[in-house]
Image: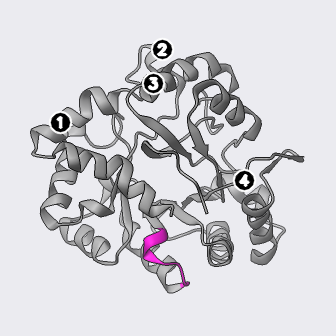
Amino acid sequence: MVKLNDGYTLTHEHMSIDLSMGDLGSTSFDMMVDDLKKIYDKGVRNIVDLTNQSMGRNADYVKRLMDATGINIIMSTGYYLEQYIEKYIKDYSANEIAKRSIDDIEIGICDNGKLSDIKAGVIGEIAWRGPGAGEMEKKAWEAMCIVANKTGAVVSTHPSKGVQQNPQAEYLIENGISPEKIVIGHIEFYPSEEKLKELLDMGVYIGVDMVGKKSGKSDDYRADIVKLVKDWGYLSKLTLSLDLCRKEDLKSCNGYGYIYLFDTFIPMLKDRGITDEEIELLLKDNPKRLFR
């Protein structure tokens, strides 16, 4: 069971990540601390770090961030897109892969042969490159279903661009994962309102989790999704985050920063009739229910 501190939770972030030049990493420490303290002042007490072992996960670094900011960071286990995971799983069975992640959750995260006292609290972000999963991705997903069924951990997904959201949810549910423990991420790429409604009808959570990003859709579009989900009566199934993963996007580097969610995006939601009570639902109550 993951214990969330009382306060707001960002459900899809990366405290350190190593997939491309300019990604957040250990050289970003002082800037990250400055940015995170700004949102601590806004009430953020928990961040779900979806950087898994195939994305540059760094438990020691995350521990330093927690100590410096007072924010509780929930770390992850799992495997990302096909091109990043082959070296980690090619020579292993799904059961062997699952055992490593179960140990991350039950014993402690092991990065580069070093065991941490931090235990993983979420499976994610697991990915399909789409359309459909690649060979390595299929094996990773089979393994992570074993992990989820064994541990009861939340599963958070990366559907890439396209039409994979609903198939991902269907796959997880068919393999025994409760919809109440599933977050389908990057929902701004949903293919149609009909498909989005079908996804919500399955009972899963969805993530409007790319707030502030200039790639993909606009923030007006993202805010409209929140309003649409409210109109359908599913606001209790929606989570908010920024998926900030590059140094240049930190406020301390003249980017938009984590504070953008509070200073810019939430006012956009209020302009669409989202109330203060509903903001509390999105940032506090929904994550608490998801991780109970």
Highlighted range, magenta: 175-181
The answer to the question of whether label 1 and label 4 lie on touching residues, with beta carbons closer than 8 A, is no
Q: Which mark is residue 249?
A: 3
Q: Which residue is mark 2?
A: 253
Q: For the residue labelled by badge 3, is the local secondary structure a helix, a strand or a loop? A: helix
Q: Nearer the viewer, residue 4 or 144?
A: 4
Q: In the image, which is nearer the foreground, mark 3 or mark 1?
A: 1
The kind of residue tagged 4 is Lys
- Which circle marks residue 152 in the picture? none
As helix, strand or loop, the secondary structure at mark 2 comes to helix
Label 4 CA crowd tier, 10 Å (few <14, some 14–19, many 20+): many
Is disc 4 in contact with disc 3, using a CB cutoff of under 8 Å?
Answer: no
Q: Residues within 10 Å of mark 2 (few under 14, many from 20)?
A: some
Of the residues shown, which amino acid type is indicated by label 3?
Asp
Judged by depth in the image, the label closer to the viewer, 2 or 4, is 4
Say whether marks 2 and 3 touch (CB < 8 Å). yes
* Residue that mark 4 sits on: 119
Q: Earlier in the sequence, mark 1 or mark 4?
A: 4
**Residue 268: assigned label:** 1
Q: What's the residue type where badge 2 is placed?
A: Cys
Q: Secondary structure at mark 1?
A: helix
Q: Residue 31: percent from the left, percent from the top?
A: 56, 17
Q: Is residue 147 left or right of residue 42?
A: right
Please rate how many residues cluster around mark 3, counting C-alpha atoms within 10 Å: few if below 14, some from 14 to 19, many from 20: some
CA separation, marks 1 and 2? 24 Å
Measure the alpha-carbon separation of dots 4 and 3.
Answer: 28 Å
